[in-house]
Amino acid sequence: MEILRVENLKKYFPVQKSFIEVLLSKELKFIKAVDGVSFGVKKGEILSLVGESGCGKTTVGRLITGLEEPTDGKIYFKGEDVSKLPKDRRKEIYRSIQIIFQDPYASLNPRMKIGEHITDPLLIHDIADNDTARKMAIEMLERVGLVPGEQFFNRLPYQLSGGQRQRVAIARAMVLNPEFIVADEAVSMIDVSLRAAILNLLLSFKEEYNLSMLFITHDLSVAKLVGERIAVMYLGRIVEIGDVDDVIHHPKHPYTAALLSAVPSFDKRDLKVDIRGDVSNPIDLPSGCRYNPRCPFADDKCKESEPELEGDDFHSFACWHPLDIEVE
Amino acid sequence: MIVKNLATRIFKPIIPEAEGRNMVIAGLAIVSIILFMAIFADIIAPYNPTKFSGKPLSPPSPSNLMGTDNLGRDVFSRVIHGSRVVLMVVFSASAVSMAIGVPIGLISGYFGGKLDRAISMIMDSMYAFPSLILAIAIAAVLGPSVFNAVIAISVVYVPTYFRMTRGQTLSLKSRLFVEAARASGAGNLRIMRKYIFPNLVTTVIVVFSLSIADAILTEAGLSFLGFIVSAPTPDWGFDLSSGRPYLPSGYWWMITFPGAMVMILALGFALIGEGLSELYAPGRER
């Protein structure tokens, strides 16, 4: 059963105009951060969302969490269209969808005790009174590895290391007993030596509560490690999505292949797919396939019409000239 | 110096070790001495400040430490008693402006939009007036009294608090921890109260002591022009104006001592403010 379904999701941010442009009444321009994204996540499944910075993967996460209102498209949570629900029901749904941010140094209030970061969500949602919330927070702190919880409860964020802070962020998300977690680059700012520990902590919660996850990352090797399914995003669109092993070993889209050949750890004897130039401007997208200016295989067809995502649940891709290669 | 040693011994334990610490200690020492003077004025002052206590216009001497004024009143006693009005006016006025400016700035900055533009425009137009001119205008409309002076001065300093709070709120509301609070379901009121306001407090304290330093000068100006007290109540600014006609004839002590006190008190608060802003400088986030 799909717990989350996203249909043709779009988010355009208006571009700030200069005063002269306003006077000349130029038409409003938009950054197309997310431009028609559809995917589903099953109960208990992890979907990794990869792509280079600026491709819109963080915006997808923020849209799902309700931190951003979509310009167009639908988000279904357990079959319900989130945007159509009354306010209190939405609050309940957003309780079940929690987010863990990338930067543990910025995601904690510097003037609030560690413990209060965890009791606050409980108090907001009327789950517990002050004393119970405190008890639950201390338990949760110890569960995420901050022992003794009693001591960590009273500390301030500046007294903790980056890894410890990220554990607090995880505790804050988990204390609400969510069903869906958006992990937005949750381990990319952590020291490499601690990355595995934080990752395992997240995965242990996933096992224990049968959580579903959207794991946003730019690191294909992390995606391979955690993901059951993987979606590759380029300039606001998903270009390839499917089973993680199949996508990584049989990439169909030249962009996925180019990403793979950029990862040093993969064995890439047969894999030499180039990528040219820089990411195109998300305000004035190239015509046809949005990857065509950088693609070594692009021809006239790619410049004229944009390919749609085609295939099945196991593996689908959006490309006129899919590759047929194997990566060890 | 005894004062310095004493001040260091009292204040050092409560102030974190960092740059700006000595400034804060010096400022606190000055302010607490003057505060002490104001509270125990009746005991410290050798004479009644409103009664004849020596030959008029006599220069500083052992019996009249700062000389006497044209009516034979002891300048030293008047200087000591004069601290009361200034401190009262300046503290209550600053507290009122803070109580008005900070919440308005917080709401305006947090919600933004048309309301924010309207409030900012009003505040900016108030800010465009020189503080003393605006205070004089308000005091002139309301009439001379201590209470009206408090109102006049507090109105003048509301925009200072407003601008500072609004600016800080604008930057704080886009910080990640505010987003995180929103993701865990916190409403606007809770975000302002628990996530934004506590991060404003240090800046508010700094602005509070700096604006007090400024308000002291405004108070002295208003008092000099007769908008706060009337004879025979002692007040530094007021005594400056009553001593002024005698300066050309060489009776310097009538204005030198009250004038110096205004300066020293303003300096004390400025030192606290400057020192605190160093102490809480960005990068030393705690």
Image (cartoon, rainbow, N blue to C red):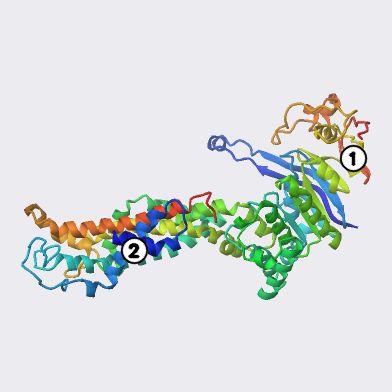
Instruction: Give the structural element (helix, strand or loop) at label 2.
Output: helix
Q: How dense is the environment of label 1, judged by Cα within 10 Å: few (below 14), some, or many (20 and up)?
A: many
A17 left or right of A123 in image = left
Q: How dense is the environment of label 2, judged by Cα within 10 Å: few (below 14), some, or many (20 and up)?
A: few
Residue shown at the point (35%, 65%) measured from the top left: B91
Q: Position of residue A186 (x, y in %)?
A: 74, 50
Nearest to the eye among marks 2 and 1: give it.
2
Q: Nearer the viewer, residue A261 or B175?
A: A261
Q: Is residue A45 visible?
A: yes
Query: On the image, which quarter does residue B135 sit in?
Result: bottom left
Q: Position of residue B104 (x, y in %)?
A: 48, 60
Q: Is residue B149 visible?
A: no
Q: Nearer the viewer, residue A84 or B259?
A: B259
Residue picked out by circle 1:
A247
Vertical relation: B222 (above or below) A327: below
Q: Position of residue A51 (x, y in %)?
A: 78, 40
Instruction: Give the structural element (helix, strand or loop) at label 1.
Output: helix
Q: Nearer the viewer, residue B277 or A5?
A: B277
> What's the chain of the residue with tag 2?
B
> What's the chain of the residue with tag 1?
A
- C-alpha gap between disc 2 and disc 1: 74 Å
Query: On the image, which quarter does residue A305 sit in?
Result: top right
Residue type of the residue flagged with mark 2? Leu
Residue shown at the point (20%, 65%) measured from the top left: B79
Residue shown at the point (29%, 54%) measured from the top left: B133
Query: On the image, which quarter does residue A94 sit in?
Result: bottom right
Q: In the rendering, which numbered label is found on residue A90?
A: none
Residue picked out by circle 2:
B6
Residue type of the residue flagged with mark 1? Val
**Total number of numbered labels?**
2
Quadrant of the image for the N terminus of chain A? bottom right
